[in-house]
Amino acid sequence: MSASRDQRSGSKRKILAAIRAAGRIARIDVAKATGISQATVTTITAEMLSAGLIHEVASDDGDRGARRGRPRVDLALRGEARTVVGVKIAHQSLSIAILDFSGDVIGEHSAPLAAAVQSTHDLAAQLRTQISIAAEKAGMTMDQISAVGVGLAGIVDATRGFVHWSPSLTERNQPFRDIAQEALGCPVFVDNDANLVAMAELMFGHGKNVQDFIVVTIESGVGMGIVLGGELYRGTRGCGAEFGHTKVQLDGALCRCGQRGCLEAYVADYALLREADVVQNSKQSSARQIAVLLKAARDGDQTAQSIVNRAGRMFAMGLANLVNIFDPQQIILAGERVQFDHLYADGVMASIRQQIVQIDLPPPEIVIHKWGDLMWARGAGAFAIQGVSDMALKDLGEHAS
Amino acid sequence: MSASRDQRSGSKRKILAAIRAAGRIARIDVAKATGISQATVTTITAEMLSAGLIHEVASDDGDRGARRGRPRVDLALRGEARTVVGVKIAHQSLSIAILDFSGDVIGEHSAPLAAAVQSTHDLAAQLRTQISIAAEKAGMTMDQISAVGVGLAGIVDATRGFVHWSPSLTERNQPFRDIAQEALGCPVFVDNDANLVAMAELMFGHGKNVQDFIVVTIESGVGMGIVLGGELYRGTRGCGAEFGHTKVQLDGALCRCGQRGCLEAYVADYALLREADVVQNSKQSSARQIAVLLKAARDGDQTAQSIVNRAGRMFAMGLANLVNIFDPQQIILAGERVQFDHLYADGVMASIRQQIVQIDLPPPEIVIHKWGDLMWARGAGAFAIQGVSDMALKDLGEHAS
């Protein structure tokens, strides 16, 4: 691709992103928001209109239009332009969201996984089965699906669609995208699940007002997604934004990854339970045991408090390090475990404030988003929307800008 | 400023940066490198030519020119367009580099500071005196200096030229830029010193080939500069990229900052010396004591080894965390203490490799740059060049792009 095509391609992405962010917006405001000339905005949006990606809607700014003598026209995304699927693969289950091109959810479905750890081919076959069921529930067929986005835990090079390692897969170094595309018969986009929560925030949540934020997810493990300047930051080998296995203690507690002193080895479910097991031998499910432990801590049990408090203090140390390194506008905590508050109780927040560099400005805001798996699936869908948008924009006519 | 002016301003910066990176380059190659149309490149470079920022030079690609029938013409920066000064303020001394617009060093000077900690006004007065001496040595007068860049340790909001805190200043919250501009009578740009080493790498060093790298400086303290996508990353409050005060041990060793467990509290000079003082009471200078301690460790003294090894292991843990978080192409270690190898000995490097997330790709390269204070001053000069370039580009004629 020539360099001036690169620039034109960048302009198309910016224009579509501006329309998506605004919901509905006049051409002149697209030019203002993107810094692209009005002539170029007019040319590119004409191509988007004829490709059916966007449509014209009467402005709700009626008065102003009337004064000008003709109704003002806004641009908006055409929801029916594309239909995509987002899938979150969790420890024991998968969640599916079907989205239109605007990002609105038009169908959803959940199902248990056949196995918590399986081959990529087996997982791809299950994706096919469950997406078909989800499509049928929404009154659609598979061939109406333009693309599928998949989020899973692990180390994923999203650019290549390559999974270095995932707790959901039996084997390392899997060309996940290629295998899934063959099974599903449509383009597939795959990324680390925490990155896709950040993508959901960027497209549907806080990203509209905040350009530099970090999402930390707390489920059975600890994940992170980093957004800088309104873009997901992935690192050069596709394995950046790793937080759960940053070290908080030299030669510390043994982690499931085989290394010592990882943050997860102090705050993950298994870390809390191996401590709880020292003093009590429970036959209950992990989720139930965690709930019992946290309640005991709240009720004043000293051993339970000692277990939970250490997790909170280690988590505070890790978050303070992120603040020191990134100085973000906002940190968002999300994931199944934020239904409990032990990792953002007052003491944890005070500990973060004590451990960050002290300047006479308020620290970054820390917000809690109690989202379920559907929002994660919606993030995977957002990634698919980005993918199909790029493909559609590439197909638009090529003119000099 | 209107949005299309913003875009044009971005194009001007990109074009000047492409010429700076190439040294000498044909217009058509500027268009290719930047993705800006040839017509726009021709218009903008004509303005730069008439403003005297760049000049035309005969291409050294003589054969090709001859075959085409007329000599090919390249563009290059005009060194004499501007003269800037870069200053590094160290613990006991300051170093000055005078640079031309191409970044070539045309003069240098060092002097002791009147005091290691002083008021901003006193420091600004010394800057004036020493820059005058440096200018005179180079056969120049102060009024030939277009701008001064200053790097100092501490927490600096470079955008506002505001120093939240610096070990070189008696008071917090100093409008350093304004005070220095008044004393020096020209524009001043101020930033954290480690950021300016990263700036030097970006403009004169590795930045030409590497777009995502981290510079870690080891002097009496530990500093960091982060370059992502070829741009310095500063954080939202201007206090990002803090590494020396990230925590490596919960409730750990007391740091000079008043907090506990900071990386500096294990690897800085004072941290090594407070351990060494437990077993020996030396009257020598700090620098001499550090040299004696490191030699004793090399010679097999077990206590000395215990002190030095812990510093190395804590440093490895901190660097491994940076790799896990950023996944950069390269990490550059620089600063006075890299004359000794205790923080990048084989054991330290092995420890980093053990603590990063394991994927089947080689880890980021770690390179050692044994630079003196002059390179830091050159980085401060690079920041001033960026500043005067922005000012000059703003003055260029305004046409539609």
Image (tube, coloured by chain):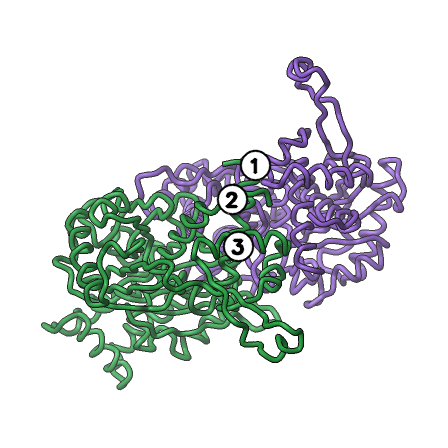
Chain colours: A purple, B green
State if disc 1 and disc 2 touch (CB < 8 Å).
Answer: yes
| Dots 2 and 3 on the same chain | no
Question: Mark 2 vs mark 1: which is more N-terminal?
Answer: 1
**In the structure shown, which secondary structural element does the residue marked by tag 3 occupy?**
helix
Q: Residues within 10 Å of mark 1 (few under 14, many from 20)?
A: some
**In the structure shown, which secondary structural element does the residue marked by tag 1 occupy?**
helix
Three-letter amino acid code at the position of disc 1: His
The residue pinned by badge 2 equals: A213
Q: Residue furthest left?
A: B283
Please tell me which residue is depicted at 65% across the width and 52% down the height of the picture: A7
Q: Where's residue A128, x and y in %?
A: 84, 51
Three-letter amino acid code at the position of disc 3: Ala
The residue pinned by badge 3 equals: B46
Three-letter amino acid code at the position of disc 2: Phe
> Cα distance, mark 2 to mark 1?
9 Å
State if disc 3 and disc 2 touch (CB < 8 Å).
Answer: no
Residue A98 appearing in the image: no
| Dots 1 and 3 on the same chain | no
From the viewer's perspective, is residue B342 above or below residue A351?
below
The residue pinned by badge 1 equals: A206
Q: Quadrant of residue B232?
A: bottom left
Q: Residues within 10 Å of mark 2 (few under 14, many from 20)?
A: many
Q: Chain of mark 3?
A: B
